[in-house]
Image (cartoon, coloured by chain):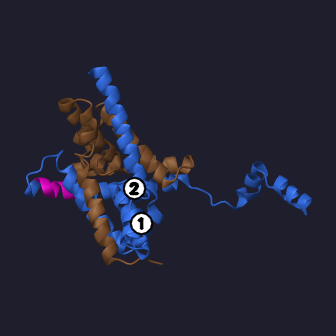
Amino acid sequence: MEQLLIAFVVGGLICVVGQLLMDLTRMTPAHVMSSLVVVGVVLDGLGLYDPLIDFAGAGATVPITSFGHALYHGAWAEAETHGLIGIITGIFEVPSAGISAAIVFGFLGSLVFKPKG
Amino acid sequence: MAERTKQIKFQLNRETYSKETAAYKPKKNVLWNSLKAFLVGGFICMLGQLIANFYMMYFNFTERSAGNPTVATLIFIAVLLTGFGVYDVLGQFAGAGSAVPVTGFANSVAAAAIEHRSEGYVLGVAGNMFKLAGAVIVYGVVASFVVVLIKKLIVG
């Protein structure tokens, strides 16, 4: 129960950061999402994102920042074992779930649903 | 005639334009928008936590490895909601609260795919699927490349 509350608060706060970027600057949602992904990458590079996941669970894995974290993780792990070429081979290793699911379900969705309005 | 257009151009420069339209712009309520984003975004993450707990309990995932199946499940739900037109309504209300979670990423993919269906399955659906999500992937990949490279050169 406590875990759910922490996920709620941390995830909600990350969304507030996105909302403030949209309201206070003139960023579009696409700009906000791209920026937050980069933030996720940088935080993970500094070793700060994993502790956040341990603390907040889905509050840290569900926001788009975790996509940056996943990209960085795969790239770093492969770079450790195979050197610099590992960055290229490893970058999509971890975020596969998100990208594959979005492609497959998105495509199937376009077969089933018709555009609204 | 030429003089006339010149005059209109002069009157509509950047400064006077923003001054004249200021009264008609919709006012942004930053606090209320943030609250809505907090509540909806928090709710989506809480839902994610429930799904993660389910995977940890029944499929032997750990706290960290449960993230991937959770994300995939949320994406599936988001695509369904997008197809039924629910997610767009939610997005109008919640702003970043529905855009920032991974469900917003899925929504952008599914919405673009469904919207461009009439242009065919190759050029329409497949070609437009990553119109918005592509930006996220490009910046994420490039940033990861740069950060890993820098870290590798410093730490070794």
**Residue B133, position as x, y percentages in the image:** 39, 55
Q: Is residue B12 visible?
A: yes
The label number, if any, that marks residue B69 in the structure image: none
Quick check: B8 left or right of B95? right
Residue A79 among those drawn in magenta: no
Question: How far is the residue under mark 2 from the one under mark 1?
Answer: 10 Å
The label number, if any, that marks residue B133 in the structure image: 2
Q: Colour of chain A?
A: brown
Q: Which residue is mark 1?
A: B112
Task: Residue at 43% x, 51% y: name it.
Answer: B135
Q: Colour of chain B?
A: blue
SS majority, magenta:
helix
The residues colored magenta run B51-56
Residue B53 among those drawn in magenta: yes
Chain letter for mark 1, please.
Answer: B
**Residue A103, position as x, y percentages in the image:** 30, 61
